[in-house]
Image (cartoon, helix red, strand yellow):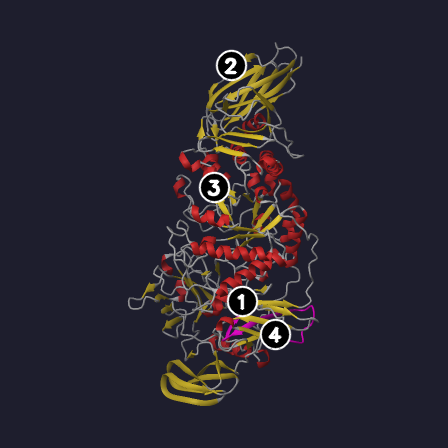
Amino acid sequence: MKSLRLLMLWLVSLATLPVVQAQVVTAQPTFFTATDQVTLTFDATQGTGGLKGYTGDVYIWTGVITDKSTNDSDWKAVVGTSFSAPIAKEKMTRSTTNANLYTITLTPRTYYDKLAATDKILKLAMVFRGANGSPEGKGTGGKDILVDVAQTSALSVRLTSPTTGQFVTKNSSVSVSGTASAASTLTLTLNGTQVDQKTSATTLTKDVTLTQEGSNVLKLTATNGGVTATDEVTVFVSPATTIAALPAGAKKDGVTYLNGGTSVILSLTAPNKTTAYVLGDFNNWLADTKYQMSKTSATDNVNTRWWVKIDGLTAGQEYAYQYLVDGVRVADPYTEKVLDPNNDQYIPAVTYPNLKAYPTGKTTGIVSVLQTNAPEYTWQVTNFQRPSKLDMVVYELLVRDFVARHDYKTVTDSLDYIKRLGINVLELLPVNEFEGNESWGYNPSFYFAPDKYYGTKNDLKKLIDEAHKRGIAVVLDMVLNHSFGQSPMVQLYSSNSPWFNATPTHPYNVGTDFNHESDYTRYFSKEVIKFWLQEYHIDGYRYDLAGGFSQVQKTEATYESVFDQSRVNIWKDYYAAQQAASAGSYAILETFVATEEAKALSAAGLMLWGKMTTNYNEATMGYNDGSKSDFSYGYFKQRGFTEPNLVTYMESHDEDRLMYKNLRFGNSAGSYSVKNLNTALARQELAAAFFFTVPGPRMIWQFGEVGYDKGIFMCPDGKYPGDDETDPKNYGKDQSCKLSNKPALWDYYDNANRRRLYDVYRSLIQLKKDEPVFENYTSFTQDVGGAVKSIHLNNTDQNVTVLGNFDVKSATVNPKFQKAGTWYNYLDGTSLKIKNTDSTFTLAPGQYYVYLSKKVAKPAGTVLATRNERAAMALGYSVAPNPTSSVALLRYTLPQATAVQVTVLNLLGATVRTLPGTGKQSAGAHTLSIPVENLANGIYLIRMQAGEQQVTTRLQVQH
């Protein structure tokens, strides 16, 4: 019996039937085998309607369901390699008469060329999308679109309407139509009683009135020469909906747990719907009038909620459930846990122990979970004091790529590393349920459920609690610009959604665009905001794509460059709701709006992301042309803010790593090359000195403190797709691996030069947090536009002067010390007596100083090699044997050809010997003999000048 009939019989037994609509995809011919040519027609107005009215090219994303597939989501032989980068053979042809109709003609056996010859094709599986993967068109409820493939050319029959059943009211008339592959006697029955028959026909159409409440089975039989084929669907006749107010004390949405743990009230917002049921473990997943939901209002859809009370539950037991709304099965949008038939199997037990099994064979799609008398987490920190904005040092972290086990528990175990660095705000990339497992999290579908790929809800609570124990606030990245196809709110409406726009309002949207002028969206967003603050004790949010929170249509040119008062008003409203839920919590917007709008948002108390990646990276690479390497805009007052509401960063999840570009594209002069690893790391120290000493919140991306150098476009195999290393302009053109896993390189901390960078970060962070001058400064000046940069801070107790040379050759600078006297180099502990505040310094390339007028101790345990020691490590500079009585061998490696001079000095600094055989030398390893027979016993300095670099080591002569 053909697969559609088997599928429909299964759906009949479940009574979980989707809403019937015009077909999203039709096939011509209707009946075709894997070796037949077929034309598929996609109607963009049907299903989710995501491509309705779209004017760009439309592509199919398709695979097949075969006899090797485990379920209808297990696609095989998927065409192409990337959803967001379609190939030519996937392009659809737009109709010349109807711009919402698209066709493609193919022969399954040859089009799906990754199939083995023995694979049996049962169905074609597909969705549709624009050229970059968005927008997207799917089946009703956000489902994959499936088209049956006939297994034989013998007689076949199919009910084409209703396609997969529907819910109707009693005495409704349903239009039934069917077709056969050959002229036959076609007989239509309703619940076993014949209602129509045609002879020598290939089609049958009949309007049928349904009077029986519950399941009604429509069966079409084709008979031809003793051969019979059948197909059937079920239509469910729903009793009239009861109108009743939501019980007192019940939540407006989601689960209300009643005393005793044996009863719950379920509530769902779904305006303009006709019927709603609850299916679940408690009723064997069958539609039943006992579980039909009441509606709160007969006339006012704005306040329409559906609800039902369920009794007889076992306290402490988990129950899976779904809503069945006008035949569409969806999970609860407010659920705190979901079960996923496609992705849960890849979650290891060590990450999520005793995960409830999915109810396979009883339903399809995402299901929600409730549990009465669930174990509560006992909070240990209940009076956490959040860091002031001026002291904030944020660590942005993606759980998936920070620890190999990708779980909250291992991140918790790593908190001491983060605390030791001096971090006081931990920002987690989105942790609420998103599509699939491997993700950055910016494709959300459930907003109240922690993603199980990272662990349990109580694991997350413990992470937050343990962070608070260590003085670290926790901020969640929250995505309320859009939602994705697994979201119940997306699935419930293909048009006229109470939450979403039919078309995005801005060009950077992905998924389905929220309408933040809608009362429904405002209510939902505020519930999300309140939930995590109160249930998980978090300390605030970083809001993704905050520039999209407006109904004003925008282009790339106007997205953030034009003042939008409505966007300001929306954010003020959300910020007020957030402060009402948790006073003093942080609200950080990922938005880079025009200056006046940014000032308005800042004045309202909202913080804004301060992207300075290009500026810092240009400088660390050694390019200092004009404004591209100017740091001044990283200071909040430079932007006209009166409050420290600018979260400035050199790196973020969305930007490339500074170290990668240093090593790949760094500048050079003589023997000094930024492409040298240790030189590049030293320049990251230089950047840090001009980053952490600027007043205001700072943010770093995970492992930036050890010079993480894997590019953002790197694939899991370590390669960069489409990258032409000979031409920097080609870098990043292929971004297909941008979201791919990146290695967690914890061994970097064991490398001496990387550990030094960590300790420089650590020392500067402590200085920033502990010294009052960075909070209560009477003046702050910066000269950070050229290659040589300086910063000055003052208050009555402390003066700070930061100097640095971002060039690749030596430079002269007037430090402009604020006063004469003794100044202390914070990072190496040396001091400097200044008599003339107008004197000049010569700085080697990459050289920097952080001078304080009052001595401050570095954090205990920091290991900060001197500049000379770092240069020695970079050149592999060594002398042996040491001590020696006759000859010592000097060994070093030059990264490129340069002039070299080696001298021997006594401890008074006088030159006692200049070694012959130096001058211009080639790149590579070198050895030089140092004769000492005629030198007196004692300690001597062996100094080498290699281009712009100078390095010195000690040699003991002992006859």
CA–CA distance in space, label 1 to label 4: 43 Å
Give the structural element (helix, strand or loop) at label 2: loop
Q: Is residue 316 left or right of residue 888?
A: right
Whether 316 is among the magenta residues is: yes
- Mark 3 = which residue? 612
Q: Amino acid at mark 2?
A: Pro
Mark closer to the chain start, 4 or 3: 4
Measure the alpha-carbon separation of dots 2 and 4: 96 Å
**Tag 4 residue:** 247
Q: Amino acid at mark 3?
A: Met
Q: Position of residue 110 (x, y in %)?
A: 39, 63
Dot 2 surroundings within 10 Å: few (below 14), some, or many (20 or more)? Answer: few
**Residue to which mark 2 is pinned:** 916
**From mark 1 to mark 2, how far is it between C-alphas?**
77 Å
Query: How far apart are the alpha carbons under marks 4 and 3?
Result: 53 Å
Q: Nearer the viewer, mark 3 or mark 1?
A: 3
- Against 66, residue 509 (above or below) is above
Q: Which residue shows up at 35% across the image and 66% down it?
A: 102
Question: Marks 4 and 3: CB-CB under 8 Å?
Answer: no
Q: Dot 4 lies on which element? A: loop
Asked if residue 608 lies left or right of residue 406, the reply is left
- Residue kind at label 4, given as amino acid type: Pro
Q: In the rendered structure, does residue 436 fall within the stretch colored magenta?
A: no
Which quadrant holds residue 728?
A: top left
Q: If you read the primary sequence from the N terminus, does the residue marked by circle 2 or circle 4 appear first?
A: 4
Asked if disc 1 and disc 4 are in contact, CB closer than 8 Å, the reply is no
Q: Earlier in the sequence, mark 3 or mark 2?
A: 3
Visible residue check, residue 438: no
Q: Disc 1 vs disc 2: Cβ atoms closer than 8 Å?
A: no
Give the label on residue 70, or none: 1
For the residues carrying marks 2 and 4, which lies nearer the camera in this image? 4
